[in-house]
Amino acid sequence: MSDTQFFGRKAREWIVAAGNLVMKGREESYRFTMKEKTNPVTEIDIRCEQFLKAKILSQFPDHNILAEESAPIENTSEVTWIIDPIDGTTNFLHNFPYFCISIAIQTKAGVIAGVIYDPLRQELFYSDAETEGTILNDKPVHVTTTKKVQDSLLVTGFPYKHDEIFYQNFKRFQRMYERSHGVRRSGAAALDLAYVASGRSDGYWEFTLKPWDCAAGAYLVMKAGGHVTTVEGQNYSPYIPSLLASNGYIHAEMIEILNLNNNT
């Protein structure tokens, strides 16, 4: 077994265990605080992140960790684990059933594995550099073959901060909504991307993402046959906040619509 396969296997094992912690915590009376006016973090986020970090460092003490709720751990390895302990914390806090855990594993060559787990539905999305395509619960999944935006179901997200980007995306939302079967705002970027990868939606865009929001999901979309760029159509990186993911067929049309009169 290669290092990549071993890392991926451990990520899948640990993310499911973390999902069990999240589901158990969901039944508790837990505290939460607000990082920003509309951006909560719960005790369960912290507990899940600490669990995953402890597992990683116990097995790979020289690896780096970039996680949402704590300072980065910078060690000597070229391998970095990118963790979102609960993507969709607002949903989780309000018992809205759409949230997940996300892990990406990155080297200097880029992301080499992505794992997303929805503990409510017990759905495990994953792939690694030596896996053909993207897998959902041991079965291969693929992006859709929808050819036109007018026949598509799309997803977007809005930033916590109600700034110019926030209001500009409402205009983009309206343009896409008028041209498609509909646009959803589900509130968990990683799971939104997993749904593009598994053919449950045709495309997704957002402007203010962090690496833990999108690194795993974008990787799964690409491995499932989709395409990922910035919203403007430039090369994608998980460290660039602008992201557009699609089945590939509607990508150019989405870029055109999203950037049409974007200052008006």
Image: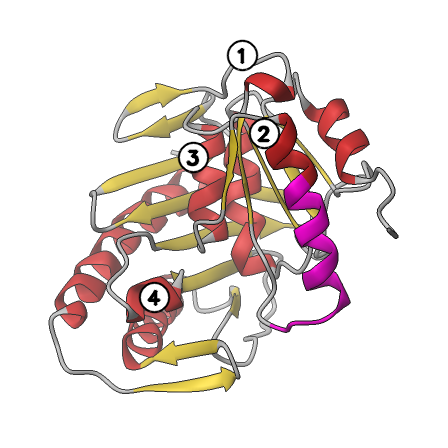
First in sequence, mark 2 or 3: give its number.
3
Q: Label 2 vs label 4: CA separation?
A: 25 Å
Q: Tell me which numbered mark, 3 or 4, is placed earlier along the sequence.
A: 4
Give how far across and how far down residue 73 sits, in percent.
54, 75
Query: Label 2 belongs to which residue?
Result: 222
How many residues crowd around disc 3 within 10 Å: few (fewer than 14), some, or many (20 or more)? Answer: many
Residue that numbered label 3 is attached to = 195
- Label 2: element kind: helix
Find numbered disc 1 in the image and state the secondary structure of the residue it sits on: loop
Asked if the residue under mark 2 is in contact with the one under mark 1, i.e. CB atoms within 8 Å, the reply is no
The residues bearing labels 3 and 4 have C-alpha atoms spaced at a distance of: 24 Å
The residue indicated by pointer 4 is 52
- Of callouts 4 and 1, the N-terminal one: 4
In screen coordinates, is 124 left or right of 183?
Answer: left
Q: Position of residue 164 (x, y in %)?
A: 76, 66
Identity, as a three-letter code, of the amino acid under mark 1: Thr
Q: Is residue 113 visible?
A: no
The secondary element bearing badge 4 is classed as: helix
